[in-house]
């Protein structure tokens, strides 16, 4: 535990000479960075990951009362957005109820930009030695970020004192990442069902008057920040990638230089500065005034010609097999990363004309190609990766005996860890994928409100067989079909069962018979001689195992 040790004499003199330092001190902050990605919906050892994380946070709020809490979430709002990161709750005294209320609204659905979330936390937290960061996650970075570098920068910049992590996965790569983040952040890693020591690490700093060690505590100068953004055509429009920004003081000295369309320069002495922004052949100058403990903002708008880049990543030797799992970066010639994509193909529009590098990576293989973006044109780039591949063969059943096919299933297969959809089928209960890169996948099936997610692994030059068993209650529908109300049998009647997706799943000929069906609603299509009739039935879980019905062709 980090302890401040000062002498009684120094404490008194510090207070007399600098009373504002003591009186203006804020409560220490614990910033919670919470993984709300899609995989947090899953269970681990019979416990839902996200619900378990809520329990941990609730207990922490109760037991660490000396702290103010904030909440940063990622993967909460959109399924495939790389920068889905937000400050959900601002650190503030007595806002525990607000954090719990926000947690109750969250339905995990997105990706895991862990690295950028830590960078974002650094922009939110003020410099000092009172802050802790707690990262709760089950995942691995899948948006191209660098979590370890971000963790080191947070500690080195004194934005946080320690970074602790809580993990919800037993996979070596994911556990190792969270352990390394904690190590880079001078903190500790905890497993989700063994985190008691976490609370001990959040004991508040103590003032000790014994065995004194004098710390020359020099108050920090009150500083401010400069924030800027560069756009094309209009304020808030498309980013002006490739912009060069210089910050100049009143003496004409350049104190900072940036090569990004947006940025923030921290810890600037309050004064008047000139921002010089260059984009393509255009140059703009604007004055900006920095005040203590405030961020001064300035935007720039340029007229610029634009074009597009479209890329596709295939497996070498076949344009039918996509290189799923590829992370593709597009980098401006000045070194600015303007795009990071986690799908095998993509199109980036309204890029300022100029030179770029397209840099895809897959399974440790890196490719790169220089591209010139021209006005009003799309540069089409194709990459081929020499990847090893395999297949997934799947079957979906209603029962554990695997006798009843799960018609009407909505099946999706995702490439891990980036959750890229590689296969989708809502018409067949069984099938085989195309050739897929080796690695881990999630087979996800949804039927009648029940969702099953299972991990499978593809090995080189092999087929992975997998069965999804739903164990949904089935009802024996016993029917009798009559020509009229006098109960004359409709011999030769054709009965078809149509599921909610419009698929014909059963068919029989005869005036009576039975079908075994999972609970749900169906349409019965009856054909007798030249007469056609449709009847809707709804089989409920509360019904008995045998449901008899009578069908009358004419009434």
Image (cartoon, rainbow, N blue to C red):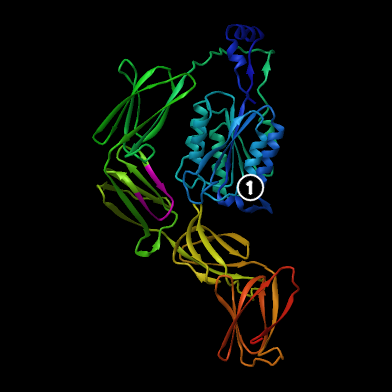
> In front: 283, or 221?
283
Residue 268 shown left or right of residue 37 in the figure: left
Image height of 493 relative to 239, above or below: below
- Range of magenta residues: 338-348
Whether residue 266 is visible here, answered yes or no, is: no
> In front: 312, or 209?
312
Image height of 257 relative to 438, above or below: above
Quadrant hosting residue 35: top right
Residue 144 shown left or right of residue 10 in the figure: left
Q: Position of residue 189 (x, y in %)?
A: 61, 38
Q: Position of residue 527 (x, y in %)?
A: 58, 86
Q: Position of residue 55 (x, y in %)?
A: 69, 43
Q: Which residue is mark 1?
A: 50
> In front: 75, or 525?
525
Q: Residues within 10 Å of mark 1 (few under 14, many from 20)?
A: many
Q: Is residue 342 magenta?
A: yes
Quadrant hosting residue 211: top right
Q: Is residue 517 magenta?
A: no
Q: Residue at x 51, y 39 (%)?
A: 117
Predominant SS along the magenta part: strand
């Amino acid at each position: 535990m980090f302890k401040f040790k000062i002498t009684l004499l120094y404490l008194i003199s510090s207070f007399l000479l600098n009373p504002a330092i003591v009186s203006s001190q804020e409560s220490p902050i614990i910033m919670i960075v919470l993984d709300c990605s899609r995989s947090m919906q899953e269970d681990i050892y019979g416990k839902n990951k996200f619900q378990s994380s809520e329990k941990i946070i609730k207990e922490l709020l109760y037991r660490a009362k000396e702290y103010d809490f904030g909440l940063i979430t990622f993967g909460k709002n959109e399924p495939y957005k790389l920068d889905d990161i937000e400050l959900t709750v601002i650190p503030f005294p007595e806002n525990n109820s607000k954090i719990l209320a926000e947690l109750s609204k969250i339905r995990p659905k997105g990706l895991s930009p862990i690295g950028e979330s830590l960078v974002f936390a650094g922009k939110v937290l003020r410099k000092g030695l009172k802050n802790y960061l707690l990262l709760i996650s089950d995942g691995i970075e899948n948006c191209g970020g660098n979590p370890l570098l971000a963790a080191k920068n947070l500690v080195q910049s004194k934005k946080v004192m320690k970074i602790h992590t809580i993990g919800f996965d037993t996979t070596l790569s994911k556990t190792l990442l969270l352990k390394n983040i904690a190590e880079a952040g001078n903190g500790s890693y905890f497993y989700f069902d063994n985190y008691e020591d976490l609370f001990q690490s959040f004991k508040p700093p103590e003032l000790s008057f014994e065995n004194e060690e004098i710390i020359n505590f020099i108050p920090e100068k009150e500083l401010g920040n400069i924030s800027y953004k560069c756009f094309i055509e209009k304020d808030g429009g498309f980013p002006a990638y490739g912009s060069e920004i210089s910050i100049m003081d009143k003496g004409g000295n350049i104190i900072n230089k940036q090569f990004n369309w947006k940025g923030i320069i921290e810890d600037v002495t309050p004064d008047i500065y000139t921002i010089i922004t260059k984009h393509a052949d255009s140059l703009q100058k604007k004055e900006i005034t920095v005040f203590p403990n405030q961020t001064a903002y300035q935007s720039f708008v340029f007229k610029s010609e634009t074009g597009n880049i479209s890329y596709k990543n295939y497996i070498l030797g076949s344009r039918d097999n996509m290189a799923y799992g590829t992370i593709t970066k597009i980098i401006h010639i000045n070194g600015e990363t303007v795009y990071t994509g986690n799908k095998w193909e993509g199109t980036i529009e309204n890029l300022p004309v100029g030179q770029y590098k397209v840099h895809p990576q897959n399974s440790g293989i890196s490719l790169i190609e220089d591209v010139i973006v021209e006005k009003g044109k799309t540069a089409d780039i194709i990459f081929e990766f020499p990847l090893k591949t395999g297949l997934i063969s799947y079957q979906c059943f209603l029962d554990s005996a695997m006798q009843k096919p799960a018609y009407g299933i909505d099946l999706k297969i995702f490439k891990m860890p980036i959750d890229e959809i590689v296969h989708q089928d809502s018409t067949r209960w069984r099938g085989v994928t195309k050739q897929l890169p080796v690695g881990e996948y999630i087979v996800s099936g949804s039927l009648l409100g029940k969702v099953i997610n299972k991990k499978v692994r593809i090995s080189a030059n092999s087929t992975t067989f997998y069965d999804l068993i739903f164990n949904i209650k089935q009802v024996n529908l016993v029917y009798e079909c009559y020509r009229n109300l006098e109960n004359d049998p409709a011999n030769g009647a054709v009965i078809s069962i149509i599921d909610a997706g419009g698929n014909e799943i059963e068919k029989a000929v005869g005036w009576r018979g039975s079908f075994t069906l999972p609970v749900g609603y169906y349409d019965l299509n009856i054909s007798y001689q030249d007469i056609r009739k449709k009847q809707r039935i709804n089989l409920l879980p509360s019904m008995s195992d045998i449901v008899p019905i009578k069908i009358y062709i004419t009434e």
